Image (cartoon, rainbow, N blue to C red):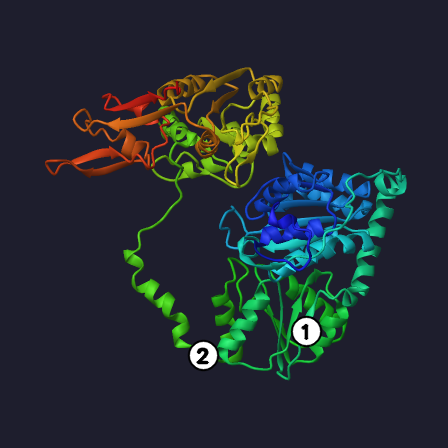
Amino acid sequence: MNPLASPGAGRKLLAMGNEALARGALEAGLGYFTTYPGTPASEVGVVLQELRADFPGLYAEISVNEHVAALAALGASWTGVRALVTMKHVGMNVAAEALHFAAYTGVKGGLVVVVGSDPGAGSSTSEQDDRWYSLHTHLPILEPSDIQEAKEMTRRAFDLSEAFDLPVVINAPSKLCHNIGDLALGALPIAPRYRGNFERNPERYLNLFDMAARNHGRALANIDRLRAEAGGQGFDRLLPGPGRTGILTSGLHYGYVLEALEILGVPDVPVLKIGMSYPLDPAAIASFVASVDRVVVVEELEGFLELQAKHLAYDAGLRTPITGKELFPAWGELTADGVLDGLAEVFGAAVPDARGLGQRVLAAHAAEVPPRQGAFCPGCPHRGTAYALLRAAGRDVVYAGDIGCYTLSVLPPFRVSDFVTCMNCGTGSGQGIARVDGTPVVALVGDSTFFHSGVASLLNAVQNGADLLLLVLDNRWVAMTGHQPSPTTDVLVDGTRRAAVDLMGFLKALGVRWVRRGDPFSPGTLENLIRDGLKERGVRVIVVEGECALQSERRQKRGPPAFEEYVDLDPERCQRCHRCYRELACPAIRETVGPAGEPVYAIDDALCQRCGVCEALCPNSAITRTRVVRRRAA
């Protein structure tokens, strides 16, 4: 049994924040789960899919995008089944339309939306603050401050959702999602509800004519009711003190604040820790603001708490200064050191000299630390694609990039992505460039990203006669966010076969007349195919099929190999043309010293994935593969 499925209350585990969120949903009686995977929230879906073996009635799916996932979870909620939908912060943009209507229709079974935020954009192309959505979706927001609270708030969020007839959002930053800490388990329900019953209710579910306006009014009434009862929910925590400067904070920064005050030696500072950041409790805010001469708001990104606190204080007739963004930037990740520095300025206290020792040592040796940048994994099919694409198209085209592992093609030595903004930006923005710029446009998109939001853009390009060459890089997995299955995945890691979309047929059905299939492990053939595509006009699509090397290797390791394979580079035949080392930049090929002290290339057998790309592109046949077939036992 998975430890997270343990029925016993009180058992303690070491758990990741995402695991705590999943366990909290299970303790609440979760029956239906949907997600489109996105870092930092991906592991919630991974955990719940794995736990289906321990909870046979639980439904858990990887959806094609966040919009579909949110709508499906809302539908399950209407039947009385408790539903959870997870996404990363930019996924909220995709799900926004569905979640705006969710407050209008309300829920029957509790509906919880976990949003994994990414301050600092460590694994994203933006760091938007999704809390602001609640000012117009009218969805309550909970902000856990640690691993245990992540579970407890998730569990309670389902009750809150049903009590106030609204979906509830849990804002989980990357530091919470991926941190590990102690988790005390609670009790699991004896009989979770996995099946429901949809009851017709036109007044709620038909947002047409005057019914939409009435439902809007009902949503506002529900959030006003929660605002009036916010003080009784117990999500907020007040640490009283006689100090005249008070601190208002939420989430992980509560711990940072307490640590900073201890380091600075500043006692008796009143701290109001917000657990429900929308709607704020008006009475609690007014009482706290009235008790001090100044309020400092410690929060990440764009002053969501600060704005609400100023509004509520003004309505209460208070003129106490409330500051925050003057001290803590509205961009980037707010770290413990950042909180320490900001509060040191507030209280006029000195940061202990030893506290900055690590930063001073790093600064002194920064020039000696080699830079680290992302790179394709050894054997990645996208490496061969980028190599062939650059050789075929050169620098005389616009490369329309997109979100996925292939985004790394923006880096040297390839640089075949000229812009990357959001999911499906390549096909979407690429056709706009192609329409008004005479330069040929080559767009890239992965299989999962294509089905996420690229279908409509490609259809638009076909219908409007765009001039665009699109490479669909089909590695059969949602690889960048944790190797979840995509619509083209036909075999799982354990060997289970599943129905996969016929991508070639699908593209033809969309009206694409020029559709070809390419092999990233045969770069010469793919290069010629791309050259052919560049000669054509209109919408042309090349489906580059090559499975993610990591997943292929994982599946092969589950059974005895049928053969052993070795790749060798003969230094005497090698002419050091640099194609494998500099142009392909394969990490398994290393420069070393030969017998006479001369520089030679060699293959690192521990890194080599035997993909064959180097062998295929070597003009001197210096690279060879040997396959040793295992004999069956007599």
- Above or below: residue 191 compared with residue 425: below
- Above or below: residue 30 compared with residue 383: below
From this viewpoint, which residue is outermost toward the bottom?
A: 242
- Across and down, in percent, residue 452 comes to 60, 34
Say which residue label 1 marks. 238
- Across and down, in percent, residue 302 comes to 59, 59
Q: Amino acid at mark 2?
A: Ala
Instruction: For the C terminus, give its image quadrant.
Output: top left
* Cα distance between the residues tagged 1 and 2: 26 Å
Element class at badge 1? strand
Element class at badge 2? loop
Does the rendering let one see residue 55?
yes
- Above or below: residue 189 compared with residue 10: above
Instruction: For the N terminus, give its image quadrant.
Output: top right
Say which residue label 2 marks. 350
Q: Earlier in the sequence, mark 1 or mark 2?
A: 1
Does the rendering let one see residue 220?
no
